[in-house]
């Protein structure tokens, strides 16, 4: 790794989706990618579920044992706004990465096209500076009510990509509370650990700082800033939002170094692109006394088995 490659400028994009509008949100993502490129970013990161948005506050007309017709209408609208991978939308994102000459990591709601075509996944897509779709990660375990709208990923989409700026990988939101999932990422040598999220609690900041100190890696945490008036008012279940606060997600995106200290402290209450220059030598510097999968590991005591085979759909024989 050359001296120039030991440093990388990153951009963490705290922005709102154009909720349930795939095309408009993609256009916004492209514009923000170009803005970050002008500032010299080599790696550009967007939040969880950015295209077409994280449907905070909606129940889709669901309670235990019942689903409403109105909720199904909103679900269909969400499904129609989802992203097939690959598709014209991924081509637009890849072209943006190519023009920016940067790695682009972005959260989307992915529509399955391998079996029924109906299931949605909370997915992170990775694009290279040549515009290619490098791969994806599907969220392994949707949290709480997310399980109503998203399926579960499997071990076949747990990639870590080797780039000129270090190894990059991602776990989404509360996947990062799964110790074995984190260990799987560490064991693959992740150096820039990306945590797209919808969690704006103060406690989330403890989580990302712990990951950085535990994994001796840089952590890029990216959340949306979102207000209730950004929702389309013609949702069939719009009245569900009446009790929601005006500021539905306050943000909290941040960049953390490999000793757990902030490089860029969390930003709240607005859209903003956070920039930092990372010196990858700080990783080795931090691992002098602790390397979670190196000299501090005890493989004679602990072993981790990761099933990275693709989960097969039901097949007729």
Image (cartoon, helix red, strand yellow):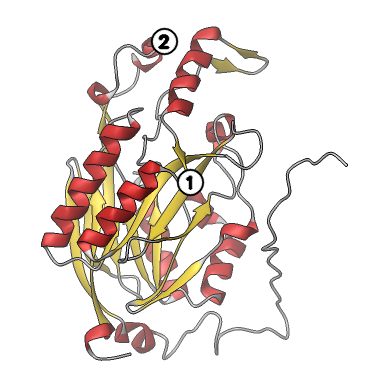
User: Residue shown at 21%/61% (left/top)?
Assistant: 100
Q: Which residue, given by chain and number where applicable, does mark 2 sit on?
A: 236
Q: Quadrant of the C terminus?
A: top right
User: Residue shown at 40%/25% (left/top)?
Assistant: 57
* Mark 1 secondary-structure assignment: loop
Q: Is 114 above or below relative to 101?
A: above
Q: Position of residue 23 (x, y in %)?
A: 30, 33
**Left-right relation of 260 to 174:** left
Q: In which quarter of the image is the N terminus?
A: bottom left
User: Residue shown at 31%/72% (left/top)?
Assistant: 257
User: Residue shown at 31%/47% (left/top)?
Assistant: 92
Does residue 125 appear in the picture of this structure?
yes
Residue furthest out toward the right: 317
Q: Is 79 above or below relative to 176?
A: above
Q: Which residue, given by chain and number where applicable, does mark 1 sit on?
A: 85
Foreground: disc 2 or disc 1: 1
Q: Position of residue 216 (x, y in %)?
A: 42, 77
Q: Which image quarter: residue 40?
A: bottom left
* Mark 2 secondary-structure assignment: loop
Name the residue nearer the viewer: 146 or 316.
Answer: 316
Instruction: State which tag comes first along the sequence, 2 or 1.
Output: 1
Q: Position of residue 16 (x, y in %)?
A: 26, 38
Q: Is 279 above or below relative to 263?
A: below
Q: Is 140 above or below relative to 167?
A: above
Q: Are marks 2 and 1 in contact (CB under 8 Å)?
A: no
């Amino acid at each position: 790794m050359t001296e120039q490659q030991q440093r990388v400028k990153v951009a963490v994009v705290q922005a709102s989706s154009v909720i349930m509008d795939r095309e408009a949100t993609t256009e916004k993502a492209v514009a923000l990618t170009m803005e970050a490129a002008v500032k010299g970013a080599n790696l550009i990161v967007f939040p969880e579920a950015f295209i077409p948005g994280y449907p905070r506050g909606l129940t889709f007309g669901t309670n235990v044992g019942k689903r409403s017709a109105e909720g199904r209408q909103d679900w269909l609208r969400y499904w129609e706004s989802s992203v097939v991978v690959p598709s014209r939308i991924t081509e637009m994102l890849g072209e943006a990465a190519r023009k920016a000459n940067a790695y682009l990591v972005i959260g989307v709601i992915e529509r399955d096209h391998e079996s029924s075509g109906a299931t949605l996944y909370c997915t992170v897509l990775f694009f290279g500076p040549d515009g290619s779709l490098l791969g994806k990660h599907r969220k392994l375990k949707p949290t709480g009510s997310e399980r109503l709208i998203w399926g579960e990923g499997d071990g076949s989409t747990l990639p870590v990509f080797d780039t000129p700026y270090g190894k990059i990988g991602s776990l989404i939101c509360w996947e990062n509370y799964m110790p074995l999932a984190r260990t799987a990422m560490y064991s693959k040598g992740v150096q820039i650990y990306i945590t797209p999220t919808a969690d704006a609690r103060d406690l989330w900041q403890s989580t990302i700082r712990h990951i950085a100190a535990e994994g001796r890696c840089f952590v890029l945490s990216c959340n949306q800033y979102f207000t209730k008036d950004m929702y389309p008012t013609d949702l069939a279940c719009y009245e569900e939002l009446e009790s929601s606060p005006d500021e539905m997600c306050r943000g909290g995106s941040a960049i953390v170094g490999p000793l757990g200290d902030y490089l860029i402290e969390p930003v709240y209450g607005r859209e903003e692109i956070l920039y930092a220059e990372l010196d990858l030598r700080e990783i080795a510097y931090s691992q002098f006394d602790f390397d979670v999968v190196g000299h501090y590991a005890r493989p004679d005591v602990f072993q981790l088995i990761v099933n990275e085979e693709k989960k097969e759909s039901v097949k007729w024989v």
